[in-house]
Amino acid sequence: MAPSVLQQEFGLADLVDAKSLADVCRSFSELYRVGLKVFDAHGNKLVDVKVGNGDFCGYIWEKPQGRAQCIATVGRVKGEPVAGEAPVTFQCFSGCRYVVTTLSYQGDPLGRVVFGPFVPDDLVELPRTLTGIAPDFDPRRAGESMRLIRRAPQRTAEQVVRHFGETLEVLAFQGHKSLLTARLHIEAVQESYRELQEKNRVLEASLAKLRELDRMKSNFIGTMSHELRTPLTSVIGYSEMMLEGLGGPLTQEQKEYVSIIMEKGENLLQLITSILDITKIEAGRMRLVLSEIEVAQFVADAAATVLPQARKKKIALSCEVGRDLPRMVVDREKLRQALLNLLSNALKFTPPGGEIVVSAQAAPDDRIAIGVRDTGIGIPEEHLGRIFDVFYQVDGSNTREYGGAGLGLAIVKSFVEAHGGEVQVRSRPDHGAAFTLLLPREVPAATLRAGAPTPLPMAYAVSRS
Amino acid sequence: MAQINAEQREIAIKVVYYGPALSGKTTNLQQLFHRIDPKVRGRLMTLDTKDDRTLFFDLMPVFFRTGSGAKVKLKLFSVPGQVMHESTRRIVLQGADAVAFVADSRRSEAEVTRSYWDNMLANLEANGLDPRAIPMVVQLNKRDLPDVRAMDELADLRAGRTPFAVPAVAVRGEGVVETFHALLSLTYRNLDAALGLGRLWRVPEDEFLAQVFSHVDLRGTELERVGATP
């Protein structure tokens, strides 16, 4: 830390504003009609107000000996050590006088105040030290110009200079207070800033570390998913072969068991595929494979895929496709995945007797809106902002009713944004939810060039680790 | 360490009153201000807000010249107690030669007291000052209030040693001069060891303390009772 202003010593010029000091001195001089000089502790003159002695001193200054003695007197008044706090009188050879007081502040000398010259009220005639400075000295002229100088009792002069010294001490105190306040304020701000920067550095370092951990985690998940998929393919494949009777005939019960093994294996495979998709998205390795599709057919195919499940759950599934929809250029597999994810959510969250509608229609700005709306449980408003986060679950409790890994919507959003599109959602709890994929007819060149989408927001994976 | 001007035989010593908000730091300085002869002290510079809470610091200088011609300047500071003035506390602590930790004795304040104590130790270290070596007195203030800790209940206020503790009711002036005396006595010994105040500066401890406390109104204090100082 740099030395604080509290550790520093200040001179009179630092503490008192020069112009204010000059104003105060002038005002005092006018009041008493006596000159006033202020010097700092090093003898530098800060203020010099002359009153009445111009003619008198000017005449003496004309005589070489007078000039020399004048310089000597001024030197003594300005620099001769003054002990104690009481005013000290300096006698000028001209008969005039100066009263000097030391300015002290907090026990330290700050400078001195010189009050004068004035003519002591007991001076009767010009002293010989003055009249003898030159053979042609004119006492009458000197006497007349001396009358312009204030005649004052010694005691009054001492009182005035003491009083002035005290006033200056107050000014110095006020100045010191303002100076410390202002400078300390700046120091405190600087210190807080330094502290904040220090904390920022620490935070940045831990953020970088977390990112690295996150990257390692994604790599791990990617590798593990891949490793899991290989044996799982065998599990599914052999189950399928058994069902087809390639290993010999099966009883009805055995067939049922093997079907369950195969179905659960496929669920697992789907989950692993989703995880792989997410890790690819996070690693920025997602690439679109573009081809032309016929929207109405595309939507109908997706609906047909989930129709058996809808029937099984007694949910009405229908398609609403606008007329004369143009053809689109998309990554067919990814868009199909996105639409199936929405449909599978709709099926999951819509109770029996409900309704699901898949739709496709033209939207402004040469876009196509593909939508899935249901009459399910809906999404509370406070969750709407986060449902697209990876691993986010509206019901994150251990006792939740609906399964899932919290990846489906994150994948939908990434895939759609990779196409230069956006996902919109509207919902009312207990009245259903409506998701709309707004897609450009062709993926904009800029989106393709930009490559990887922005990293997915993590719901709680980081804080958990 | 004290600022020294060997050429002019001047030594400036910085004493800081530290502690939680409203523990009585400014009250200590105000009481000292009233009890110390204006001849040896300057004005009390206080920077407070409308609600009388210290904004930056309080400052009061005390100065004297010893028989051997050495000039001693004591600068008494208090830090602002409110939590938000953390950086100011650290700045005021810079270059401190001694610290008085003013604590609210009430048990209900123990947690806050402890956190400011730790904060002081951290800020001393941030200023390159060794909390275990710097002269330190704990003033257990507000002894007139109910449920105060015992005078030897200092386990939470340690810095490698149990600090010297002085009981006080600063608003009534009780224990204020005693705290100051104990602190200056420790400060002298520390500076004597480091700078040779007695040997090189020819300022013995009794004179050092007498130069200050002969100008302090000791009426009603423990010092008057034991006649510790002339």
Image (cartoon, helix red, strand yellow):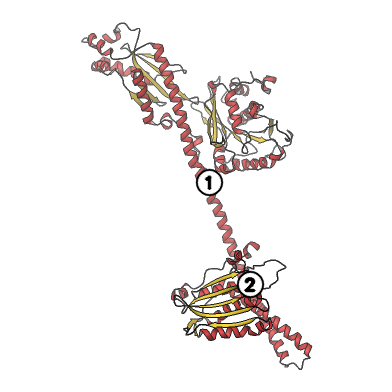
Would you name the residue on which mark 2 appears? A221
Chain containing mark 1: A
Q: Mark 2, residues whose alpha carbon is within 10 Å: few (<14), some, or many (≥20)? A: some
**Disc 1 residue type (three-letter):** Ser
Q: Position of residue A342 (x, y in %)?
A: 59, 76
Do discs 1 and 2 belong to a common subunit?
yes
Q: Is residue A114 left or right of residue B17?
A: left
User: Crowdedness of circle 1 by 10 Å Cα count: few (<14), some, many (20+)?
Assistant: some
Secondary structure, mark 1, is helix
Q: Where is residue A152 in the image (x, y as percent from the top left)?
A: 36, 12
* Mark with earlier residue (1, 2): 1
Q: In which quarter of the image is residue A396?
A: bottom right
Which one is in front in this view, the residue at disc 1 or the one at disc 2?
1
Residue at mark 2: chain: A
Position in image of residue B220 (x %, y %): 67, 21
Q: Is residue A46 above or below residue A361?
A: above
Return the residue at label 1: A192
Q: B48 or A179: which is nearer to us?
A: B48
Q: Which residue is most to the left?
A: A136
